[in-house]
Amino acid sequence: MSQETSPIIRLADYKPTPYAIDKVDLDFDLTPEATLVAATLAISPRAGTFGEPLVLNGDELTLVRVAIDGRDLSEDEYEASPSQLTIKVPPNGAFRLEMTTRLDPAANTKLMGLYRSSGTWCTQCEAEGFRRITYYYDRPDVLSVFTVKITAPKTEAPILLSNGNPVSSGDLDDGKHFAVWHDPWPKPSYLFALVAGDLDALEDDFTTMNGRKVKLAVYVEKGNAPKAAYAMDSLKRSMKWDEDVFGREYDLDVFNVVAVSDFNMGAMENKGLNVFNDKYVLADPEIATDADYAGIEAVIAHEYFHNWTGDRITCRDWFQLCLKEGLTVFRDQEFSSDMRSRAVKRISDARLLRSQQFPEDGGPLAHPVRPEQYKEINNFYTATVYEKGAEVIRMLKTLIGGDAFARGMDLYFSRHDGEAATIEQFIACFAEASGRDLEPFMVWYREAGTPIVTVEESWDEASHRFTLTLTQETPATPGQQTKKPRVIPVRFGLVGPDGGDMQPSGIAGAEVNGDTLILTQPSHTVTFEGLASRPVPSLFRGFSAPVKVRQSLSSADLIFLLANDTDSFNRWQAGTTLAMTALVKATQQVRAGQAPSFELAPIDALGSLLDDTALDAAFKALLIAVPSENDVAREVAENVDPDAVATAHQAYRRTIADRLGARLKAIVEADGAAAGQPYVPDAAGAGRRSLANTALDLLSITGSQEIMALVRRRFETATNMTDRMAALTILVHRGDAGAEAALASFFERFGNVPLVVDKWLSAQASAPLANTLDKVLALTQHPAFSFGNPNRVRALVGAFATSNPTQFGRADGKGFGFVSNIISRLDATNPQLAARLLVTFRSWRSYEPKRRAQAETALRSIQIKEQLSRDVADILERTLA
Ligand code: BES
Ligand code: ZN
């Protein structure tokens, strides 16, 4: 690597800036080639500051003019480089700093700062993109009141948007026009946004709990306004929910959402002007799946909820990222639970955490929910900060109870409104509201790693006493060798022979709070007195803590819980444990050269559940969804051979398809009968489709001609994208004779809708077939593909690396080599995207030796490249360490 090693930024080094920026005026003159930005900052020294230099951040900036209080500075009064502006001796007292910078948005391929997306000017400033617009204290603890004037050619950009409320607008000479926006709420630079383009809008309004009318608009590319209806509906439901559940009212006259087609992330919560990846806005039944609808609802809610948890109260520094992200994910999870099924949402979130966060915690990129150091902050928008960050807040609520949690939230909102806060300040609100010492709980924020809780049980028939020994241990993670015990809330039930919970006459050995045991020590021996017979323990109900549980319940006990537990999550968990145990054993058999074999009792138990009319379809779909090959590989943990996992996985699905075939067919047929009704993207319809498509996928593993004909028919006659895509994926993944024709007809119909092209690319990239890599290589040359668009890259290369374990993990190393080449290539244009692709290598040390060596070769080939970005260099360094 030839790039200089970048400095480490440390939490312990936090210091406020010597100057405050009280007011910001920005004046943008937008022309395609060169944009001029005139910034005027009202600056004042903070108490105790005298004559310190003013040092502002920049990134690839060109300074045109700098003046103080109206006087242009001479060259010896300042130092300017693309990455920094220093005013050597600022005036004593308050002053006005004027700067003009020149930008080239059209050449900005990093999609940070001001760039163009399909002709629209737009910005992305989190985390450190504002410094690509003007020199600034580009950090979250510098809050200021922004006024923004935008001037642009009127035909090219009839719509001119920024944060806050519109103030004035009008026509100018030369076909230009302007608009002025003012945001009364002080905010950090990362929440600044500007959009200018020729966009259509879907408009509506919302009346707040105090009767204020807010104008709402979702801006989209011309002609797409009808596709914004679901996003608008989700927005209004989000606004109402935040009033009802958290007492939070919106605080501006307008709320605007803009969908752009080139965006590195999902969406961004800029104050009053959320900017979205169009994937999380545009939908109709023709182009969007049930999962897309659910994603839109969740992301719209998430960004809207940031208005209070992120914008009104922001982060003191980027180490506190989970203060806004973990909390806002918790809030969007609660919203989705209330809108749809709480049980289904909880299971999906647990699956997401296990598939994304557990590998992070167990690999070279492990870091605490609140990291203590970083080189590149972009690399810390992780499953740990987001998903584990949300779990930590959920545990806090379980620990102190819903009422104290609500009082703590209210206290946080009132005490820190308008501030840039820390995790300590947030937690202090809950300690005060509950009277509980939360210092021991802080370990969840400070230490990385997934605790393993080992459970041993014994039953004493003579004394009617049941004993559980719960022992916790957290494996070492990079830079943290020793771990403290954590506060772990274990929601539990003791399931009796009739399926109901038994009530012990006494519990000793751990604090008990309602249905929750609270572990605080490395080991607890908990005794339950006065039970008539041995109960089956149901522990960690509702996934009450983000831990791994080692408990050797017998198959019979698990089948009993699967059938009887009153907690839906643990019913599903029992089924998943049974399946996982079977899959791991089968993988070992395959590796030992034996034929995989399976117990049939657990599969028959699933069959009985399919017959249960009291269960909803979405839940049944989760029950019969086999853990993924990646899930199995994670459980196997070392010396992983993805081909062996795939063989075992295939054999297991085949056993289910043979054993439950008739029931699965009946489900698909019932769905076919219901398919004539109009498509509604609600939880009930989505559940029915999900169950039918999961059943169809299982049946197709048999390769039976009858089933494959049924899949082809479903593809041809589908009335919505969910069913069409499910059928197409089966045809492609099974290498069906009809796959090529189906792909061609699909492309013919949807080739001009980029978001649907993404689905077409992903279905091919994730096919577990020997010729997939050649196809993916060819698709990189397809006219519908572009390395410049992050959605296309993720759909093709991202899907290949994350959803195709046998082909990414090919024994000849060509899968790794392909992805590493793309990373090197992308790093030159879009380092953030390149770094995110690189994360797909994080579990490379878990492979068997041959593949491990191939993966290492691929990683080192990236390292050899000249001038790596800080983003990629940081991930690479940690991945190889
Ligand atoms: N603030 C983030 C967007 C962001 C992420 C900006 C990383 C800069 C760097 C936004 O609120 C967010 O979290 N978006 C998520 C989606 C959300 C539903 C979890 C995203 O973009 O993936
Ligand atoms: Zn967020």
Image: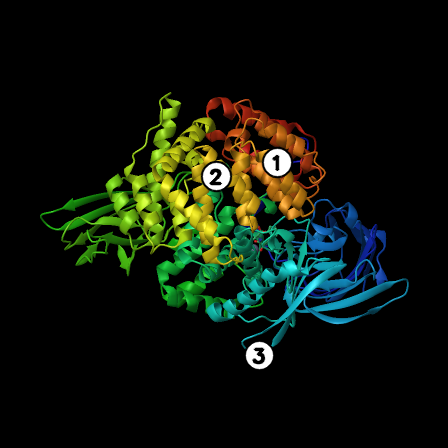
Give the Cα distance between marks 2 and 3. 53 Å
* Left or right of residue 677, residue 225 in this image: right
Image coords of residue 635 (percent x, y): 40, 35
Residue 280 seen in the figure:
yes
- Indicate if the residue with disc 1 has its beta carbon within 8 Å of ligand 1: no
Ligand 2, what quadrant?
bottom right
Q: Which of the numbered marks, if any, corresponds to residue 741?
A: 1
Where residue 624 appears, x then y in whole percent? 39, 44
Q: Tag 1: residue type? A: Ala
Q: CA distance from mark 1 to mark 2?
A: 53 Å
Residue 6 relative to residue 685: left or right: right
Residue at 62%, 76% (x, y): give it: 213
Tag 2 residue: 479
Res 531 → quadrant: bottom left
Query: Distance between the Cα atoms at labels 3 and 1?
Result: 56 Å
The reply to whether callout 3 and callout 1 are in contact (CB within 8 Å) is: no
| Color theme of the render | rainbow
Q: Quadrant of residue 281?
A: bottom right
Which of the two marks, 1 or 2, is nearer to us in this view?
Answer: 1
Q: Which residue is mark 3?
A: 211
Q: Is residue 546 visible?
A: no
Q: Earlier in the sequence, mark 3 or mark 1?
A: 3
Bin the neighbour count of mark 3 within 10 Å (Cα to Cα): few under 14, some 14-19, many 20 and up: few
Q: Residues within 10 Å of mark 2 (few under 14, many from 20)?
A: few
What is the secondary structure assignment of the residue under circle 2?
loop
Between 866 and 235, the one lying in front of the other is 235
Q: Nearer the viewer, residue 484 or 749?
A: 749
Residue lying at the far bottom of the rendered structure: 211
Q: Amino acid at mark 3?
A: Gly
